[in-house]
Amino acid sequence: MTMPYIHRMASLLGALLLGAMVTLGHACRADDYGATTGDDAKTDSQIAAEGFMAKGDWKSAAPLLEGHLAGFPDDDLSAAELGHVYDKLGDADMALYWLNYALFIAPRSLEGNLYIGEYYLGQKDKADALARLKKLDDICIFGCPEYRILKRDIAHYGAHKP
């Protein structure tokens, strides 16, 4: 092999690796998993609802998220959060409705897949929770917090199953 050939091959390999890194970086942006656009686009009701959720005040969060979704029906993150809120309130039918709605909007939604996996565990349906863990594993190329949380919850469920 001649030296110019090696330099051309190294340049080509470097360009391919850079292209792959840019492609992977683009594929992992939060926007690509659903319809939400980021913190700067959040409404006051979303921000308030998230504050209530952080404090565990699920009853106060529900109407705020419902109001937000009335105006922004394509917001998969808020739909997933509303499903999670209803799950915490013990309303299984409404939880499942909103979680399925979120996943209808954005099947690769990290939060939607996490929350429906937690919902299934609450319904003692470990098989469907494991299916959601597999989905998160497929979505999260290099791992993500949602995958780790659901994996931990499934392990905890297995260790403390009644």
Image (tube, helix red, strand yellow):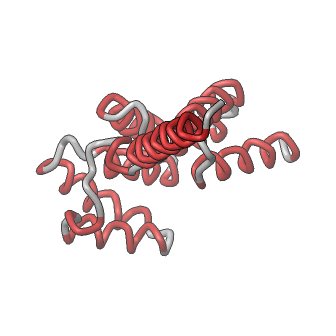
Foreground pick, 140 / 125: 140
Left or right: 33 with respect to 92? left
Image location (x, y in percent) of residue 72: 16, 48
Residue at x 38% of width, y 46% of height: 26
How many marks the image carries: the answer is 0
Image location (x, y in percent) of residue 53: 44, 67
Residue at x 43% of width, y 63% of height: 58
Foreground pick, 40 / 4: 4
Image location (x, y in percent) of residue 3: 60, 40
Foreground pick, 160 / 34: 34
Image location (x, y in percent) of residue 150: 65, 46
Q: Is residue 43 above or below residue 116?
A: below
In this rendering, does residue 4 appear at all? yes
Left or right: 104 with respect to 5? left
Residue at x 47% of width, y 71% of height: 54
Q: Is residue 43 above or below residue 92?
A: below
Foreground pick, 44 / 136: 136
Residue at x 42% of width, y 47% of height: 22
